[in-house]
Image (cartoon, rainbow, N blue to C red):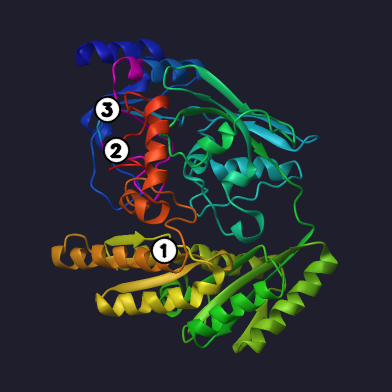
Amino acid sequence: MTAKALIKDFEAIVGKDNVLTSEADLASYSYDAAVLPNAMPGLVVRPTTSEQLGKTVKLCNDNAIPMTVRGSGTNLSGGTIPSKGGIVVLTTALNRILEINEEDLYAVVEPGVITSKFAGEVTKRGLFYPPDPGSQTVSTLGGNVAENAGGLRGLKYGVTKDYVMGMTFYDVNGELVKTGGKTVKCVTGYNLTGLMVGAEGTLGVYDTITLKLVPPPAAAKAMMAVFDTVMDACRAVAAIIAAKIVPATLELMDNFTIRTVENFRNAGLPTEAGALLLIEVDGHPAMVEEDAIKVEDICKKNKASTVRVAKDAAERNAVWQARRDALPALAKVKPTTVLEDATVPRSKIPAMMSALEDIAKKYSLTIGTFGHAGDGNLHPTILTDKRNTEEWHRVEAAIDEIFDHALALGGTLSGEHGIGMAKAKYMKQECGIAAIEYSKRMKSVLDPKGILNPGKLIVG
C-alpha cells in the first residue's frame, strides 16, 4: 500500500482534520520531555472516539506500521518518541470523564484526560485521587498509567498502579479487551490490568480506565525542617519511618537545589542550609497533631536547626510550591536538564546521597538532588549543555554510575518515570536475562509484528 493510500485510509477513519502530515506537525511529535534524539513520525493521527481508536490500531497492524501512542509527552524516559518512525497516535481528543461514582468510589475516564483536571473534578465531589505527578497540570491519565507515574504523595498513598481497578484496551488486532472491574474485590482471570499498567504502550492501547477514589484526609499539617548537612536530613528520614510514622509526603532538597529555587522565586528558603525536609502528615485531626509533634521531635533529635510548622493553608501551599519549583528552577540553570529517577531502599538513602556527591566530583558535573526521600525515590538532576560533546560524554558516564550504585544498593531503575528508551539498556542489570526473555516471548505473542511502541522497555 502506498503512503498516499494509507493517509486516505486513516482519513477515512478519523477524518481529514485529524491526520497531521505537515513537517511542522511531525516535528512537534518527534520528541518528548526526555533528553534523547528526535525521531520523526510518518504521520500523526488523532482519534476522537473509541471506535476510531480501535480501527486505527487495526490498520497499523494490518500494514505492519509502528505506532506510538502519546498523550502530552511529559514522560522523562523517551516513552513517546517514535524511535522506529511510523504513526504517532494522539489521545488528546479522547478526554472525557465518563463517570465519577460517589457511592462506590470509582471513576471511568478516557486516556486523554488531564490529571489535575480529573483530580479537581473528584475534589468537587468530596473525594480524593492521590497520585500527583509533578507534570499533572499537563500530563494525561493514560500516560500516567502507561508510565506508572508517582508523585509527592507516593510514600503514603502509592503510585498510579494502586488506583487502577480495571480498563478496556485494544489489542493489536483492534479487538476490545475488558479487564478488572468496578468492584473493590475482583480476582477473575489473569491480572491483565496489572500487566497493562506500566507497559508503556508495548502490549495494547488504553480505551477506558477505571480508577479507584478514596475519601480525602480530614486534616493535614505541613512543616519544613532545616539541617546543616544532607546526612543529618537523611538520618531524620530513616528515624521518622523507623518510628512507624508514615507521612503523606517526605521530600528532600539539597543545598544546591535550595539556592536555585530561592533564586527562582524568592520563597524565603534558608540558602545556607545543607538540606531541607518538607514534610506533611495527614489523617484524623487528633492523629495529625500527634504525628506532627513526633516528627518535629525526631527532626530536632537528628540535628535539625529549625522546624517550621505551617500555621495556615497559605504557609502550607508556600512549602509545597517551593518543592514543586525544584525542577523548573534547576532547568533554568543550563540548556540541558537530565533528571534521573534512581530509587533505593530508604535505609540506603545516606549511601546513595554520598555516592551522588562523589559522582558529581568525579565527573566535574553540577548535580542538584531533590526527591521523595520518604520512599527512597531520588531525583539527581544533572545540569549541562548537550552541545558540549566532551561534557556530554561525562554526563553519560555519570548516569551509568548512578544506576550502578542504585542497583548495587538494592534499588531500582525507576520509582515513577518508567523505562522507555532511556533506561532500556539497564533492564538486564536489574531484572536478569530470564525476565527479559520471558517478556520478549510474551510480547511476540501479543504483538507478533512488533508494532506497539517498538524500541521501548525491552530491547536488545
Give the magenta range: 59-83
Q: Check disc 1 and give the amino acid type.
A: Leu
Place of residue 195 in the rendered image (x, y in percent of width and height, measured from the top left): 52, 36
Q: Earlier in the sequence, mark 2 or mark 1?
A: 2
Q: Which mark is residue 28?
A: 2
Could you tell me the amino acid type at mark 2?
A: Ser
Q: Which dot, 3 or 2, sits closer to the camera? A: 3
CA gap, disc 1 to disc 3?
34 Å
Q: Nearer the viewer, residue 66 or 122?
A: 66
Residue found at the far front of this picture: 434
Answer few, some or many: residues within 10 Å of disc 2's Cα (few below 14, many 20 plus, some between 14 and 19).
some
Q: Mark 3 and mark 2: span between their CA atoms?
A: 15 Å
Label 3 Cα crowd, 10 Å radius (few <14 / some 14-19 / many 20+): many
Q: Is residue 264 visible?
A: no
Circle 3 sits on which residue? 86
Q: Could you tell me if residue 460 is visible in this image?
A: yes
Q: Looking at the rendered structure, which numbered label has been put on residue 391?
A: none
- Mark 1 = which residue? 407
Q: Position of residue 332 (x, y in %)?
A: 34, 65
Query: 62 and 117: which one is in front?
Result: 62
Dot 2: element: helix
| Image point (59%, 72%), residue name | 278
- Residue ID at (24%, 10%): 5
The three-letter amino acid code for the residue at tag 3 is Gly
Query: Which circle's residue, 1 or 3, is located before the other in the chain?
Result: 3
- The answer to whether residue 451 is above or below residue 371 is above
Image-quadrant location for residue 210: top right
